[in-house]
Amino acid sequence: MKTTRREFVQQALKATTLTALGTPLAFKALAEDQPSHSGTISESALQFSQVTLPYAYSALEPSIDATTMEIHYTKHHTAYIKNVNEAIAAEKITFSSEKDFFANASKLSAKARNNGGGAWNHNFFWQVMKPGSANPTGKIGEAINSSFGSFDKFKEQFTQAAMTRFGSGWAWLVKDSSGKLKIGSTPNQDNPLMDVSELKGTPILGIDVWEHAYYLKYQNKRNEYIANWYNVVNWDEVAKRLA
């Protein structure tokens, strides 16, 4: 197409103006056209990490065998950590804390919710166990006696919650918003911090009743696993979480 004299003059004037103003103006215009990348996943979003196991794989024997502990920690838990962080990145989830993440569980995808729960629940689980255990004393012992009548009655109720959780899930001892201790359970990898959970509160003790937690040693005898698990509860850690 033939360019008219007027069009040629207008184009020349535009080029001269840009040249006179210098390149910063051109770069500024380009920058304004680009999407902002502030607040991206890599800069601000929550990333789950796996706690270091606070004891050897064999440390909880005979209650929990070394092979189960190793598989549970290095395979199951590691997978939850990997999968939730993938979900956070892929879905551009921007919650910056575990508290906010779980408070909005109803808005999350199944992958984010299930694996986020699995990541947090297992970090919690490893820390509320230790080699060798005695009955709770001090503040936690008093709180259990006050709430349930006695330690034996607590164990009856907690065992009942763990035994009656159909399929896979967790049983919990939580402190509710009024400071009262309550026992209950959640399905799958849900926990009492989630807005979707019927049982709500701050977890201070929990037991994993998924079959992968006990099947190698106990097969289908969940009751035996639970009974022996009380031998490795870290009541010092539970007391810290009660405070």
Image: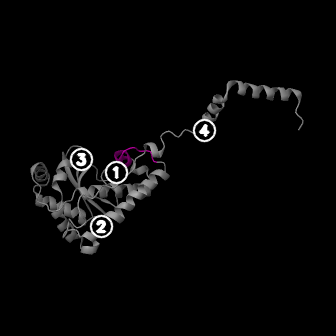
Up the image or down, 203 lies above or below 134; here it is above
- Height in image: 62 above or below 192? below
Could you say which is closer to the camera, residue 20 or residue 128? 20
Q: CA distance from mark 1 to mark 2?
A: 28 Å
Q: Closer to the N terminus: mark 1 or mark 2?
A: 2
Q: CA distance from mark 4 to mark 1?
A: 37 Å
Inspect this view and state whether residue 19 appears. Answer: yes
Front residue of this view, candidates 242 and 43: 43
Secondary structure state at the residue bearing disc 1: loop
Label 3: few (<14), some (14–19) or many (≥20) C-alpha neighbours in 10 Å: some
* Image-based side of 80 in relation to 170, left or right: right
Q: What residue is shown with label 4?
A: 34
Q: Nearer the viewer, mark 3 or mark 2?
A: 2
Q: Dot 3 corresponds to which residue? A: 176
Measure the C-alpha gap from mark 3 to mark 2. Answer: 33 Å
**Tag 2: residue type?**
Glu
Residue 70, labelled with which disc? 2
Q: Nearer the viewer, residue 226 or 28?
A: 28
The percent coordinates of residue 128 (x first, y second) are 22, 56
Q: Amino acid at mark 4?
A: Gln
Which residue lies under the disc numbered 1? Answer: 194
Magenta segment boundaries in residue numbering: 93-103
Image coords of residue 121 (percent x, y): 31, 56
Determine contact: label 3, label 2, CB under 8 Å: no
Instruction: Determine the residue positioned at 61% across, 33% down.
Output: 32
User: Going from the N terminus, do you reach mark 2 or mark 4 first?
Assistant: 4
N-terminal label among 4 and 1: 4
Q: Earlier in the sequence, mark 3 or mark 2?
A: 2
State the image coordinates of residue 108 (x, y, percent, origin top left): 43, 52
Can you say which quadrant of the picture contains the N terminus? top right
